[in-house]
Amino acid sequence: MKIVQLLPELNEGGVERGVVELNRELVRRGHESVVISAGGRQASQIEVDGGRHVTFDVCSKNPLTAFQRVRGLRRLLRELAPDILHARSRVPAWLAWLANRRLQIPFVTTVHGFNSVNAYSRVMTFGDRVICVSGAIRDHVRRHYDVPEEKLVVIPRGVDLDAFDPNRVDREFMTRFRAEHRLEGRWVVTAVGRITQLKDYETFIRAIGELGRQRPEAVGLIVGGVREDKRDYFASLQRLVTELGLEDRIVFAGSQQRIAEIYALSDVVVSSSKKPESFGRAAAEALAMNVPVVASRHGGVLDIVREGQTGFLFAPGDDAELARQIMRAAGLDRSGLRKMVEENFSLEMMVDRTRAVYADLGCGQGSS
């Protein structure tokens, strides 16, 4: 079976990561995988993993070039002759849907986020099957669009359990990281994600301040890069740390590659997003490393954080409740956390369910 995935670009982000992982796993299972995008840092990884990357402008929102690009994409699809088209974002979905009207290739879309509700976003419901990355996303689509129930399928994003394995961490890196950021002997509460207002790091920082009364050894570790347009926001977080006298209790570690190791050295992982997240990959990855999670009570993370079992939830923006829930999470039994991810959110499960969608459209399972 030949599958073509389409997305705007291949730089950083959850959609990009999912495409790269699915490409790799499809190839491992004997399928032919093609990814169409405008390019980016991860484009070469598609071919390293055995797939094919085709550079084509499915990114620009310029309506003046849209029909020219539709014609070009139609020619490209005729040449590729795929069994499945799988669009992962709105511009590629519009271009693919229009190009495919004559070709009639089975068409799949994945709704990755809480897109604004309008005619532009509706294209993500045009697939012969509409994959939703969480129950919350499925409910969003149901609430706002008239989509036949049989077209909707929930397939959570999958965690690579080989990459996030407590028994495979780099202990030397963990030792160096602890020393560099003065984490030895500290009780580490970690938040992972780019520095952006949506992550609500203000609430996280204030909660660490609240914890100081009960756990003076607690330290808040923030792991995430700062884009140029977020420099002012980052400066405001640094000012807040100073105002609260938390210079010794908040660590900004910047962008990091060894995220599994950082989870492994953490006592609790927090997701304090003020806006509902479509899935909650960081929460699932942390649980795969046997680390309990405290998260905002909304969005896709509600599928992952089970109160009193894998972690606790708090009202978005409520730093006092967040501090209390972090303390409760510290007492959870960690032994079954990874098992929950293995049974519900593994990459293998995601790939198998996606292939089943393809098969349901009459394309067959192909190699296995």
Image (tube, rainbow, N blue to C red):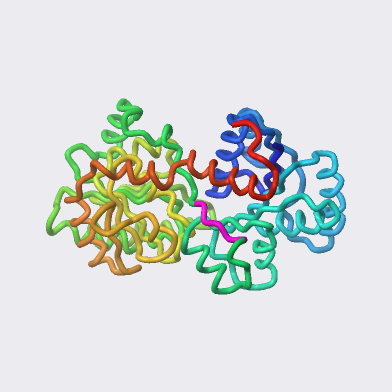
Task: Inspect this view and state whether residue 232 appears.
Answer: no
Q: Quadrant of the C terminus?
A: top right
Residue sitting at 46 percent across and 47 percent down? 225
List x then y, in percent, for residue 107. Answer: 71, 53
- As rendered, which of 366 and 340 lies closer to the eye? 366
Residue 260 quadrant: top left
Magenta stretch encompasses residue 292? no
Classify 267 as above or below 317.
Answer: above
In this image, 231 relative to 117: left or right?
left
- As rendered, which of 111 and 219 lies closer to the eye? 111
List x then y, in percent, for residue 338. Answer: 32, 41
Q: Main secondary structure of the magenta part?
A: strand
Residue sitting at 48 percent across and 58 percent down? 134
List x then y, in percent, for residue 76. Answer: 83, 43
Query: Could you tell me how many numbered marks the image carries?
Result: 0
Magenta residues?
A: 151-155
Task: Inspect this view and state whether residue 53 appears.
Answer: yes
- As rendered, which of 355 and 244 lies closer to the eye? 355
List x then y, in percent, for residue 201. Answer: 36, 59
Residue 171 quadrant: top left
Classify 138 as above or below 365.
Answer: below
Residue 298 quadrant: bottom left
Q: Quadrant of the N terminus?
A: top right
Residue sitting at 64 percent across and 46 percent down? 358
In this image, 245 relative to 42: left or right?
left
Looking at the image, which residue sits at the far top? Answer: 172
